[in-house]
Image (cartoon, rainbow, N blue to C red):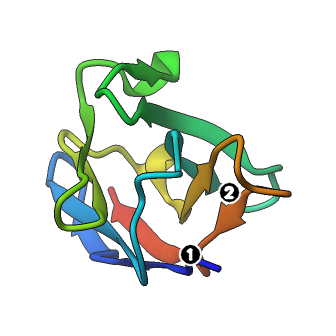
Amino acid sequence: QVQLVESGGGLVQAGGSLRLSCAASGSIFNLYVMGWYRQRPGKQRELVATITREGVTNYEESVKGRFTISRDNAKNTMYLQLNTLKPEDTAVYYCNGNGPALIRPIWGQGTQVTVSS
């Protein structure tokens, strides 16, 4: 079973940038759709962005134009570039992978992003 590990979170001032990485322990070829989710304090986990194996992307409305999702299938890694960060982006960010060969989606352990005003 492939495992996902996020990294790149941290503390940043409003308007700043971060780049999150999601490294897989094996091939992500079977992870047809990968995505980033976040859980803000006191809120349920929500979708941020997804990307298919072919590179088709989808974004939650509030992050469009600020966040960019990408994946490098050769490096078995997915990324999320976060620009123009806002305090309301503060959350634990999780990566996720799913595909028809899987019984259930795969989740990483999460990485904390904190944006100060």
The local crowd at label 2, few if under 14, some if 14 to 19, many if 20 or more residues have their Cα within 10 Å, is: some
Amino acid at the residue labelled 2: Gln
**Picture coordinates of residue 12, whole percent (x, y):** 23, 68
Name the residue that disc number 1 marks. Answer: 110
Q: Residue at x 46, y 48 (%)?
A: 89
Q: Quadrant of the C terminus?
A: bottom left
Residue 11, horizontal then vertical, whole percent: 30, 76
Q: In this rendering, which labeled residue sits more in front, label 1 or label 2?
A: 1
CB contact under 8 Å: marks 1 and 2:
yes
Q: What secondary structure is found at the residue carrying circle 1?
A: loop
Q: Is residue 65 above or below residue 63?
A: above
Q: Is residue 68 left or right of residue 24?
A: left
Q: Which residue is mark 2?
A: 39
How far, Cα to Cα, is label 1 from label 2? 9 Å
Image height check: is 101 above or below 66?
Answer: below
Upstream in sequence: badge 1 or badge 2:
2
Residue drawn at 52 percent across, 37 percent down: 48
Instruction: Report the residue at 43% width, 84% height from top.
Output: 25
**Furthest-front residue in this view:** 101
Q: Is 44 rendered above or below residue 22?
A: above
* Horizontal arrangement in the rendering, residue 104 relative to residue 65 (left or right): right
